[in-house]
Image (tube, rainbow, N blue to C red):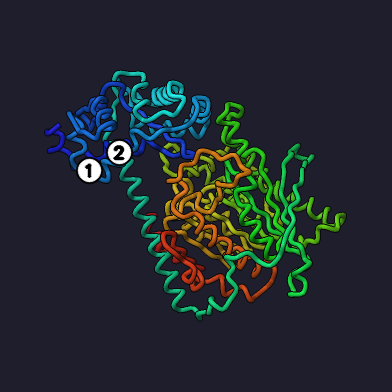
Amino acid sequence: MAVLQKLLPSKLIKSVSITLSLLLFPATELQTAALAADRIYATYGALESSVEIDNLVEFAKTGKIEGGLADYTRRLNPTQLARLRRLLTAKINLSPVAISQFLYSPIGETLLQRLGQIIQTEAGQPGFYAIRAAIILAAAQEPQGFTLLDVLRQFPTNGIRVDLMQSLETVEELQTLIERTNQAIALIQQESTAAAINQQSANFSQLPDLRQTGSFSWNKRTLQLYDRSRDRAFVADVYIPQVSGAASQGELYLAPVIVISHGLGSDRNTFKYLAQQLASYGFAVAVPSHPNSNAEQLRSLLNGLAKTVTPPSEFINRPLDVSYLLDVLAQLDRTDSSFALDLQQVGVIGHSFGGYTALALAGAALNFDQLQQDCKNVSNTFNLSLLLQCRTIELPSTQYDLQDKRIKAAIAINPITSSIFGRDGLSQIQIPVAIVSSSADKVAPALPEQILPFTWLSAKNKYLLLFTSGTHFSAADKSDPNTEPLPIPESVIGSDPALARRYLRAWSVAFFATYIAGSPQYFPYLSADYAQAISQPPLALSVVQSLSANQLAQLVE
């Protein structure tokens, strides 16, 4: 081992420990890992060294570093050592059925293929099948929750090889993505700060606080829907503002309509807080549950009742769900006096897969040429959302018209966009549009999925909101008591999600009041100045209306 340390740079030696982190690869925050049953062999070309699993077990239990493990950890600081110890002992509370169903799904197999390039069997063969077997067996042996060490004990060969060359390439790719993202975030923060200085400052302390609940009361109606043309049944909640009590203030009588589309594995309660906020400001808010990509679908997968995370047809059915829901609301508006809706001025909000849905309804076109190009080497990507986007290739390559002309403004929160739309698809949106991005998004990474795509938008009124330190789930409320929670660790949700939700409460009211309700008095809120006024640590808010495509292009070359 000493000879290996002299020949290889310290970055390579550290990559073994980094590889341990890579093994805990998120996919709906499912964490998987694999090492040798008795010994780990680290190889770099003809060079090889090893660590006994017993050394890892002792380190995990007591913190003692013995044997060959000392050579690998001597360059790690106490914080990194503590993290490694936590990774080895963290429990994963998923059943063998849930693990098996995910790892046999197309997305799970793609992740295993990439992991198997780095983690190999003792004979040097790709570790795809061995890793999958070890994880499933560990889950079966430990029904109360299994750990990385449990997976090590179940690996079906006596030893496992970690390819340091592949590991280093992987680490460097990740590091490059992180560095480029940080540079883009710094650019956005700089532009937002400059815009706040240059804008005519408004005295927001003298204006209504849009983070607070509005003056309207509301009633909720739950609709059972069935689209016969697609043989598709789904449910939608509709929050209807009550005009009495607000009419004397000159508030809206015909309520503009906002539709909220949830993300993959969520449901119509995930953004209930936002629906209620908008309803309190006089908007009628409709929140459908998309049948084959909601929380029920994901639970069916994990329980062995579904074969895939979501079928490719959901890329078509989701926008059609919204259009059908608007058709039903139009009919109810004609026949039911409790509905008084303006269905020619409709807004849409979507999160993640719902962000895709919102942008498709706004006019973004599917881009099969871009998908064919980007999905050739999908097993080499760190962009988890691309694995989902590439499922679209299984659809007939035809001209899908998913735009709904009733949609006049859209907000897409952590959307997936890079390949499903690409530059050509997103540039077709001509209505006001806002994209919300989170700097620590591991599912739909900020730079390729939101920041760079923002520069492709050609709409006159466009906005990019950035939650610094936010995650993919910062804006989603996973704590609703009416929803059976899915196993998403707190570390994945991130710090202070309530702050992200307060930002969205205020910003969505201002955005839709301006562009849907036609109330210009709300326009000052759509500014970097307002973002600076309400921004708080640990989740800073930045807003820009334009970015230099040339500056960003330098980051992705």
Disc 1 residue type? Leu
Report x, y in % for residue 180. Answer: 36, 55
**Of residues 295 and 241, which is closer to you in this image?**
241
**Residue 435: image tag:** none
Report x, y in % for residue 290. Answer: 66, 43
**Of residues 170 and 396, which is closer to you in this image?**
170
Secondary-structure class at tag 1? loop
Residue that sits furthest to the bottom in the current view: 200
Crowding around mark 1 (Cα neighbors within 10 Å: few <14, some 14 to 19, many 20+) is few
* Residue 37 visible to an observer of this rendering: yes
Tag count = 2
Vertically, is 206 above or below 35?
Answer: below
Report x, y in % for residue 179. Answer: 34, 54
**Relative to 333, 99 lies left or right:** left
Dot 2 or dot 1, earlier in sequence? 1
Who's the residue at 65% across and 56% down the image? 275
Who's the residue at 38% across and 35% down the image? 90
**Residue 76: image tag:** 1
Position of the C terminus by quadrant: bottom left
Crowding around mark 2 (Cα neighbors within 10 Å: few <14, some 14 to 19, many 20+) is many
Residue that sits furthest to the right in the current view: 335
Who's the residue at 61% across and 66% down the image? 511
**Of residues 210 and 427, which is closer to you in this image?**
210
Query: Which residue is tagged 2?
Result: 84
Q: Distance between the residues labelled 2 and 1?
A: 10 Å
**Relative to 134, 39 lies left or right:** left
Report x, y in % for residue 403. Answer: 68, 54
Secondary-structure class at tag 2? helix
Disc 2 residue type? Leu
Q: Are marks 2 and 1 in contact (CB under 8 Å)?
A: yes
* Residue 376 visible to an observer of this rendering: no
Who's the residue at 56% across and 60% down the image? 504
